[in-house]
Amino acid sequence: MRRFRNMAVLALCTLFGVSCMNDDNWTERNKLNLDANELKTGEIVLVSNEGNFMYGNASLSLYNKETKEVINDVFYKQNGVPLGDVAQSMQVRNGLLYVVVNNSGKIYVLNMGKYPHLPAFDYVGKVTGLASPRYIHFISDTKAYVTDLYAKTITIFNPETLEKTGTISVNNHSAKFYQHPTEQMVQYGQFVFTNCWSYDNKILVIDSDKDEVVDSITVGLQPTSLVMDKYNKIWTVTDGGYEGSPYGHEASSLWRIDAETRKVEKSFYFEKGSWASEVKLNGSKDTLFYINKGIWRMPVTANKLSDEAFIPKGKDNLFYGINIDPVSSDIYAIDAIDYQQPGVVYRISFKGMPIDTFKVGIIPGEALFY
């Protein structure tokens, strides 16, 4: 979940190991049985639906770009068990789908073609023993990082064995705030950059050869996401905290950092009271998108913020996520509506023309292009 709606309850759940479901009760049932070899690369979009916090109703949706067919709840239909509590993020690598289930403290690994004898989305393993996992970044075929909201460490695991092999301490020993929570990651050379969102204002720099934090970059309050453009410039957007926050409150902002020098080159501030989030790039990595009520875009070489929203916020819209197809640069605008009913994804061309609208699960958060 990108913005926790009940931080105190989540902290108790994490600290005392509360489980919201038993996901080891696998049952025999009619399976989906999609042939992984028939899922053509470039045609498939996966949508992770967070579900309601503490309800254990996270899910995955499958969308075919060519036929516009949608299959919802594919994990349950294939495996006969709910996905878990809060589907935070996804990654595909070497024919496997890794789904980070935040409040369940695990990463599910599903077949997407690595094992020809297994259907798509069939369970093949999991990484467990995680506190509050957020995002995965693959260093190599045998090494990956997992960020965490509460652990004050980044977990290292082997994607081939799914065994944890180490941790990287990110603890700054702050007595007042729980720092550093880690989120999204980008890599430049051997260095991995990760933003620290909750009650924080840092981008940490990790040497992936040494597996240790070697530097940090100060930005605005609460950087929410991270991308790197074609010119090796790192972008983050900050939400500025909230009124009454003990950590402070300021205008949301957009920052550009040079990955080589680690110096801040530009910062753009939005109006006070805005809530910017989810910075993303198009396929050629020369155009930036972000959410600020509506969806905005700007060239990465721009010297000022855009004057007009690319997709204005409608009366009933709640834009919660955005992803851009790396091949076509179609925009997938994710609408959580009211956090209770199934969400909607709007597929829009790079020129702003509507292509399709489809329903998915509860609180859709991320689209992944396969």
Image (tube, rainbow, N blue to C red):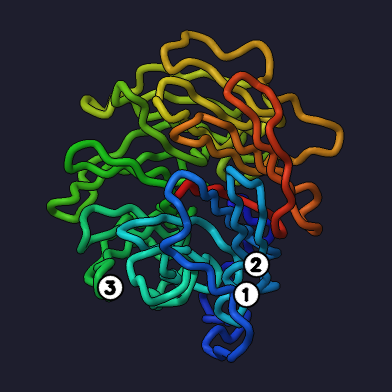
Assess whether mark 2 and mark 1 are in contact (beta carbons under 8 angstroms). yes
Residue bearing the label numbered 3: 164
Callout 3: SS: strand
**Residue, disc 1:** 77
Residue 232 in view, yes or no: yes
Query: Residue 65 at x, y = what percent?
Result: 58, 44
Q: Residues within 10 Å of mark 3 (few under 14, many from 20)?
A: some
User: Residue 43, position in %: x, y?
Assistant: 51, 46
In the image, which is nearer the foreground, mark 3 or mark 1?
1
Q: Residues within 10 Å of mark 2 (few under 14, many from 20)?
A: many
Q: Residue at (27%, 64%) from the top-left corner? A: 156
Which residue type does callout 2 highlight? Asp
Give the residue at x 19% y 50%.
Answer: 208
Label 2 or label 3, whichever comes before in sequence order: 2
- For the residues labelled 3 and 1, say whether their Cβ atoms are less than 8 Å apart: no
| Quadrant assignment for the N terminus | bottom right
Indicate left or right for 243 with 48 as reference: right
Query: In this rendering, is residue 190 above or below 9?
Result: above
Residue at 46% across, 73% down: 119
**Mark 3 vs mark 1, CA separation in Å:** 29 Å
x and y, in percent, of residue 213 in the image = 24, 49
